[in-house]
Amino acid sequence: MKKILLVILGISLSINSFARSCDSSEYDKAEYFASSYGKKLANKYPLAKDIRTTLPSCSYNSYSERFKTKVEIYWTGGFSGDSYNIDGDLIFDSDGTNGHFSSSYKNQNVKDLESWGKFIGVVGGAIVLGAASSQ
């Protein structure tokens, strides 16, 4: 059992050891792709404007040719003028494809917006079902 755990630990350490902090060229590339992804994410919310993305950290794995970045995405609501913020990890290939975002923080305005969207979806679904059943 100890040998299995040591092998697993050794493999995970060797995989992680290839990752290093981005150099300036890699950081520019990561910033470009993260900004594009941030705009796509923010535009999933209604009337997002003034979208900004920052990268507090960036690492590049030369073995897998993948970036791992911490991103902070900020935007302003079109009607309300409220400020929105989502932070998380963004992992993507060196050409910007195969991106995966996992959020670690959403401010209360984002949470409220998501709750409101779920409510609208439930109410809208009930109206559609009600209309269909009356026919």
Image (tube, rainbow, N blue to C red):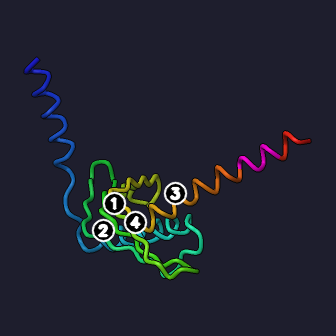
Which residue shows up at 25% across the image and 60% down it?
59
Which residue shows up at 31% across the image and 61% down it?
69
Three-letter residue code for mark 3: Ser
Q: Secondary structure at mark 3?
A: helix
Residue 27, quarter of the rendered image: bottom left
Which of the two marks, 1 or 2, is nearer to us in this view?
1
Which of the two marks, 4 or 1, is nearer to us in this view?
4
Which residue shows up at 43% across the image and 77% down it?
83
Q: Which residue is mark 4?
A: 108
Query: Measured from the top left, where is residue 129 in percent x and y?
Result: 78, 43
Three-letter residue code for mark 1: Tyr
Q: Which residue is mark 2?
A: 26
The segment highlighted magenta reads 125-130
Three-letter residue code for mark 4: Gln
Q: Which residue is mark 3?
A: 115
Kindly identify which numbered label has been placed on residue 105: 1
